[in-house]
Image (cartoon, helix red, strand yellow):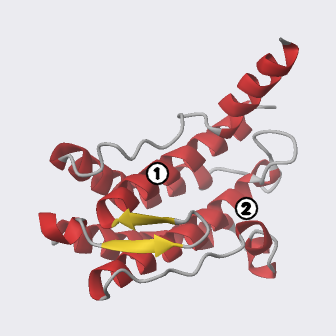
Amino acid sequence: MSSNIHNDSLDALRYPIGRVDLTKALDKSALVQNIQHIAELPMRLTAIMLPLSAQQIEKQYRADSWTIRQLAHHLADSHMNGYIRMKLAFTEDTPVIKPYAENLWAKTPDNMLSPLVSAELLVALHARWSFWLGTLSDQDFSRRYFHPEAKRLYTIAESVTLYAWHGLHHLEHIQLALRSA
């Protein structure tokens, strides 16, 4: 019993907004909302990060988790990859994407920069990304790429859902870290 309670509370910290649900990815209203989440992420991240002290950005949302600093840089790393994955799916016939080692990327020297550097990067990236997504047709959203680690195909619509969720997921991790002390 206590093992289940521990797993449930760990899951609540790992997935504070729940796990991603890709089942409604092609639903037009969900797609519009998810594109809006992508468009708004940089503004929301910047608003959280601006007032933080050097001590606060080193906080974690749970033991052995990434710091707020690492989460901000991870969002930039991940979303650059996500944008490229979707553009590959749009311009090629079911490309195989290249996964990357997220935990190793989180330890590279550029992660010592201010997290506002990554928030600024996301401003430009998400402006292009959300604009481009707004130009796609229903047929375009059905284009796919293959993820070799997940061993599955993802449509652009599923990727939009995934990356919208991903941004909200890590924003909540940052909020958890700020509330934890």
Q: Is residue 145 left or right of residue 69?
A: left
Q: Which corner quadrant of the image does residue 131 belong to?
A: bottom left
Q: Nearer the viewer, residue 149 or 117?
A: 149
Where's residue 144, x and y in %? 34, 71
Q: Residue at x 37, y 53 (%)?
A: 161
Mark-to-mark CA distance, 2 and 1:
17 Å
Say which mark, if any, is on residue 44.
1
Q: Give the quadrant of residue 103.
A: bottom right
Q: In which image quadrant can residue 172 be found?
A: top right
Vertical arrangement, residue 78 with respect to residue 21, above or below:
below
Q: Front-most of 74 and 8?
A: 8
Q: Which mark is residue 70?
A: 2
Query: Which numbered mark, 2 or 1, is in the foreground of this view?
Result: 2
Provide residue 148's location: percent of width, then percent of height.
Answer: 57, 73
The quadrant the C terminus occupies is: top right
How dense is the environment of label 1, judged by Cα within 10 Å: few (below 14), some, or many (20 and up)?
some
Seen in the image, is 99 located left or right of residue 3? Answer: left
User: Which badge, 2 or 1, is on the more N-terminal residue?
Assistant: 1
Q: Residue at x 60, y 72 (%)?
A: 77
